[in-house]
Structure formats: C-alpha cells, structure tokens
Image (tube, rainbow, N blue to C red):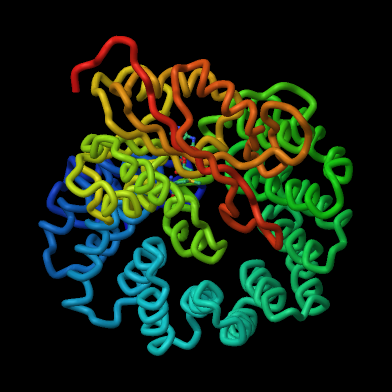
Amino acid sequence: MSILEQKAAALYGEQKYPEALDIYLSLYKKSPKTEKYSIFCGNCFDALGDAEQAIAFYKRASRLNPVSVTSLVALANVYYNHGDYKNSEKFSRRILKKFPDNASALLNLGNIAYCKGDYETAFQFYEAVYKNNKASYIAVVNMANTCYDLGRFVKALDYARKALKLYPSSVDAYIIRGNSYIELGRYEKAENCLLRALDLRNDNPWIYTSLSRLYQKIENWDKALEAGWNAVLYAGEAQKDQHINFGYLLYECAEEKGAEAAAYYASKWRDTFADNKVVAYMADAVLNDKPVKKADKDYVLQIFDAFAADFDSTLAGLEYQAPEYVAEAVRTVIKKDFFKPVRCLDLGCGTGLCAQAVKPVIGWSEITGVDLSEKMLEEAGKKYVYDRLTADDILNFLATDKRIYHLVTAADVLTYFGDLQKLFALVAGVLGNKGLFVFTVSENTHNNDDYFLTPSGRFVHGSDYVLKLLKKNGFNKLSMERKALRNEGDKVVYGYVVAAEKILTVEKEF
Ligand SMILES: C[S@@+](CC[C@H](N)C(=O)[O-])C[C@H]1O[C@@H](n2cnc3c(N)ncnc32)[C@H](O)[C@@H]1O
C-alpha cells in the first residue's frame, strides 16, 4: 500500500470521509482502471450519504473486474440501505449465482424478506448463513428476532441464548429474550432480561417500551408509565412510533384506571413535545381539557399506515360490523323504491371493507374511495371494488371534487371528526336530489355533549346532534338504528347506523 493509500485508509478509519475521498479521487484519476480505487471512492461517497455517486463507482469497479464479488456486495448493500430492495435483491442474487454461500448476500435477502413482512423466508436466509457459520452472531440474532415475529417464542429464546454466547453484551438478544418471556407469561424472567439490557444500554427506547409492556401486563401502571415515558424521552422527536405507543399506553391506563391516572404523564408529554401535533392530539384526548374538532391528520396517517396490513384481520377479531350495517341500510332504503345508486363515494374507505359489503347491494356501480392513508388505499386496491382511489383528506376532497354522487358512505369514519357540520354540508354539496348518505357514528355515553373526544382518540356523538345537523343541511332521515358496531377491549362499542336522503330544491345534473 502506498503512503498516500495508507493516509486515506487512516482518514477513512477516523470517519474523515471528505478528506479520505479527496485522496482516493486523486488516486482514481491517476489510475482509473484499478478496481480498488473505484471501490474506495464508492465507500466514501456511501459514507457521505451520496448513494448515486457510490453506485456509479461500484458499478465502474464491477465493470473493471466482473469476476470480483466485492463491488457486487457493495452494490447490494448500498441499494438495501437506501430502501431500493429491488436492486439490492438483483445484485444479491447475482452474487449467489457465483457464490451460493455468500453471507452478505444471504443476509441482505433475509433482511429484504423481513422488511416485506415475509418472516418465514427471512428466517430461511438467516438460517442458511448460520448453517455455514455457527459463529455468525448476526445470523443467529436475526433468527431469534424472526422467530419472535413468527410467534415461536421458545425458539426465539433459544436462538437469542445462542446469540448471547457469541456476543455476551448483545442488547438485542436480551430484548428478544425479554419480549419472548413476556409472551410466554414468564414475567420475572422477562424483567431480568430487560433490566440486564438496560445495564448494557440505558438510552435504548425499545428496552423501556418492552419494560412498559411488561409492567402493563402485571398491572403495575406506575412503572408502566414511567418506563413508557423514558421510551419517548430517549426516542426524541424522530421515532414517531414510540410516541404512538406511549399514546396507546396512556389511553389504556385511562381506560383501566381512569383519565386522572394518566393525566400527569399526558400533560408532561404534551408540554415536552410542544410542537408535535400528534402528541398534542393524543394527549388532548386523554386530558380532554380543550375543545378539539377533528382528529389530527398526521395522527390518522400514522396509525392507519401502521395498521393497514393487519386491519382486516384485527377488525374481524373485534367483530367489526359497520360495513355490513351500512350495506344493510343501503339495501333497505333502496328497497323502499329509491333510485338505484350508480355513483358511489366511500369516505375514509380504508382497506375497502365498506365498498366490498355495499357493492353487491348496489349492483352495477362506479365507486370512488378516498382516504388519508396510502397504505390503507393499497390494501383497498387489492379488493378490486373501486373504480377510483384517492389519497386525500375527506374535507378537502369533498370541497374540490366536481362530481355529483348518488350514494355517499362512511363506515366508522366520522369517529375521527368531532364537529360534523362542515362534513355534512360538504356531503350535501356532492349529492344529487334524493342522494343517499349512509354512515355510522359511535354513541356518546360519556355526557350530554354533541360530541366527545375519548382517550382512545376517537370521537363519540349524541344522536340528537346528528339528527339536528342532518336537518340543518337539508337531509331527510330515513333510518337510524342503534347497533353494536364492534368490540373495544372487553367492551362493546354501540353506535348508530344512519341513512339519510338529500332533498334538493334545485335539481343537480349527474
Ligand atoms: C376505522 S377506519 C374505517 C375504514 C373503512 N371505512 C371500513 O369500514 O373498514 C377509518 C378510516 O378513515 C380514514 N380517515 C380518518 N380521518 C380521515 C380524514 N380526515 N380524511 C381521510 N380519511 C380519513 C382513516 O385513514 C381510516 O382508513
């Protein structure tokens, strides 16, 4: 190695990437056909976050030495790190064609499958690495983690133990063991593992999240809240899911112990993260100390983006029936000799459960779905019931869409709106004469207010308020039935299934 190369390597080792890059670029210019200079330049660009230049240099290196695996591994990694799984997979598979046991490519493919939620395939790739090299900590800790996600908790414990033999101070392995013990109901062991992880790393928010979950299980709410609070403090603003977790914890605490029990941390949370609107909304829901008219958009987006993949199965488990009730109400009012709706708008369509239930009732139809969450819309697309799916806020969509509809549906959506005036007025604006508006609202059993924001972040409404607003906006109530809409914990959520028709004084063109 030349003196210049040694200097560049030392600078790179000290993470002085711009300085290292200067030297490598000069070496590369002098000797552009030397593979290693292209690779080193690529490494510096990668370290500096310039993926495009890194890829260009790695590809150059690969052309210079097509049989070398170094540049292919670098390409697979850089694509993976920048979320381009398609290209990462392409290069990883290319590596495996030449070297079927290449650990880096197998791990990459495992990680890609894991990110896609295909834990079974991920496990197989990690296992292939482990079979070739029993000393691979990264393979075995990933196997443990994947087993945990697959619900194989005993296996997860075993692989995490093996990981600890290879790397005794592995925080991840202790967390996996702690979480697995929680799932197996062995709370003392879980606490030991998680406290051990905390000894090793007391600023890791995930350890606190697991501890919080554990204390919640054993109904030690003080400790659960304290651990949850530490999780958000160490997570800071950046880790949004930690805040959502803490919001759920406060909600569950408020449900179990009353809102006062959660109030101290809710208000501390709101004060500490004063610019965070999602925090403000979730804390407001617990504290209920100021008027809130509508759910925060980012809150809706974050919870439903995260929920999308499991929404249908989770809601089925909660005996969610709002879509069927909406469909039933549509069937009943159509039977009563109203026109057969042909153009339908499904507000807050989510994963498409409502349109799926309504479509057979309305026969030939054109259905538009609108929702804030792209991830929910992706799921809705898979059901092939919509002619058009639009990512937008409902109020904005209604205010800007130029079409006139025969039917507007909203199943379990108005629960993200407190004040319904604007929404009802806008729905009235997109309906033709005798156009139908069929929706559900959850019943306000908390007080006599028009609407009430519950600690869950969902609004409940008074039936008189709903009727008053329908009338005010030119709707004629056709039916309003009290129904059990779904379960929430061990409680049943009751609400109203409402069908109303819009009576226009001046006919609109469809
Ligand atoms: C409980 S889900 C119901 C989904 C669907 N209607 C069903 O019955 O399965 C509520 C949906 O409303 C959407 N949503 C809530 N507020 C919204 C808003 N302001 N604009 C658009 N979509 C909204 C959420 O993203 C979520 O997909």
**Apparent side of residue 296 relative to residue 313 in the rendered image (left or right):** right
Residue 49 visible at all: yes
Q: Residue at x 46, y 77 (%)?
A: 139
**Apparent side of residue 153 relative to residue 16 in the rendered image (left or right):** right
Quarter of the view holding residue 65: bottom left
In this view of the protein, which residue sits in the foreground, 132 or 378? Answer: 378
In this view of the protein, which residue sits in the foreground, 382 or 55? Answer: 382
Residue 301 visible at all: no
In this view of the protein, which residue sits in the foreground, 344 or 40? Answer: 344
Q: Which quarter of the rendering shows the C terminus?
A: top left
Instruction: Give x and y (percent) for residue 91.
Output: 21, 63
Residue 120 against residue 91 in the figure, above or below = below
Instruction: Give x and y (percent) for residue 477.
Output: 48, 30
Q: Residue at x 51, y 59 (%)?
A: 315
Residue 278 against residue 357 in the figure, above or below = above
Quarter of the view holding residue 74: bottom left
Residue 16 against residue 507 in the figure, above or below = below
Q: Residue at x 69, y 81 (%)?
A: 184
Q: Which quarter of the rendering shows the N terminus?
A: bottom left
The residue most toward the top is 506
Q: Residue at x 59, y 22 (%)?
A: 468
